[in-house]
Image (spheres, rainbow, N blue to C red):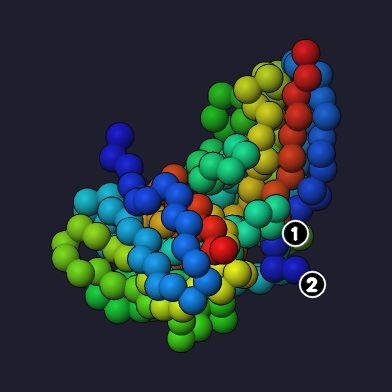
């Protein structure tokens, strides 16, 4: 089983749509969780950390389900500029926080 | 906002040559990382560095790779004898303390011919 798994997509959605991505992780000792956004041939840019209670940042909502070992990202009111690959990243506390990345989910928002 | 900076942005090298990729982490950060991403594949952890020594390395990080913090600001990745399969984007990242999100530099694209 892959350490961090994501649906590769692509998700093709119209502007204004709501879209959700899931990510599962295999190591139950994982302690830190993040969503990054990556544009083509660019560096991963932190979108948001994911907290146990769930958290929201504008149009973006992240959730963590430790029992089922998955995290999710919800994007409301999609914009053309949201088109990118969304990377799930998981870290082990005490592992000097090395991140294990999923392969990413590609989102294409069209007019 | 402080940034992680990497140089060069693109490095083209003949197979078998040595390359050094450079990173300047955010100034008060303590943990440093190198990752790589082969085109079309996922971001992979190479090595973490803390307190002037390697704290963890992946199986990719073999004897051909080394890291160094030669002064208070630079963090370098050296590949001693490059192979074609070393062609990838190499990203440096840093954090101030454990469990913080990592901030990535904009990467060095390494092309081995």
Q: Is residue B40 left or right of residue B30?
A: right
Instruction: Residue A108 in the image: state x and y as whole percent.
Output: 76, 29
A111 lies above or below B25: above
Which image quadrant: the N terminus of chain B?
Answer: top left
The local crowd at label 1, few if under 14, some if 14 to 19, many if 20 or more residues have their Cα within 10 Å, is many
Q: Residues within 10 Å of mark 2 (few under 14, many from 20)?
A: few
Q: Secondary structure at mark 1?
A: strand
SS at circle 2: loop
Q: For residue B7, say whether it is visible.
A: yes
Residue A6 placed where, x, y %?
Answer: 76, 53
Q: Looking at the image, can residue A65 be seen? A: no
Label 2–label 1 contact, CB within 8 A? yes
In percent of width and height, residue B91 lies at 46, 55
Quadrant position of residue A16: top right
- Identify which residue, A67 or B75, lies in the foreground: B75
Q: Is residue B98 left or right of residue B35?
A: left
Circle 1 residue: A5
Q: Quadrant of residue A38?
A: top right
The residue located at (54%, 30%) in the rendering is A57
Query: Quadrant location of the C terminus of chain B?
Result: bottom right
Q: Chain of mark 1?
A: A
Give how far apart the Cα atoms at labels 2 and 1 are. 9 Å
Labels 2 and 1 share a subunit: yes
In this figure, which residue is indicated by the disc labeled 2? A1
- Residue that appears at 79% across and 72% down: A1
Q: Between residue B12 and residue B93, name the one nearer to us.
A: B12
Q: Residue at x 47, y 63 (%)?
A: B13
Q: With B95 as the anchor, is A78 left or right in this view? A: right
Q: Residue at x 68, y 29 (%)?
A: A83
């Amino acid at each position: 089983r892959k350490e961090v798994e994501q649906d590769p997509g692509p998700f093709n959605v119209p502007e204004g749509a709501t879209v959700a991505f899931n990510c599962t992780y295999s190591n139950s000792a994982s302690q830190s969780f993040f969503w990054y956004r990556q544009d083509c041939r660019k560096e991963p840019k932190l979108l948001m950390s994911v907290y146990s209670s769930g958290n929201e940042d504008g149009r973006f909502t992240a959730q963590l389900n430790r029992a089922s070992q998955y995290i999710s990202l919800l994007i409301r009111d999609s914009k053309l500029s949201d088109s990118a690959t969304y990377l799930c990243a998981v870290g082990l506390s005490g592992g000097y926080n090395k991140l294990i990345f999923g392969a990413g989910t590609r989102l294409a928002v069209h007019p | 906002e402080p940034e992680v900076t990497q140089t060069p942005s693109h490095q083209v090298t003949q197979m078998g040559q040595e390359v050094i990729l450079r990173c300047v982490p955010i100034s008060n950060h303590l943990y440093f990382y190198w990752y790589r991403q082969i085109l079309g594949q996922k971001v992979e952890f190479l090595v973490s560095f803390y307190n002037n020594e390697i704290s963890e390395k992946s199986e990719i990080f073999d004897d051909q790779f080394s890291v160094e913090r030669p002064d208070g600001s630079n963090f370098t990745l050296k590949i001693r004898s490059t192979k074609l399969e070393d062609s990838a984007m190499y990203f440096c990242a840093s954090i101030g303390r454990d469990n913080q999100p990592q901030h990535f530099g904009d990467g060095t694209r390494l092309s081995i011919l």
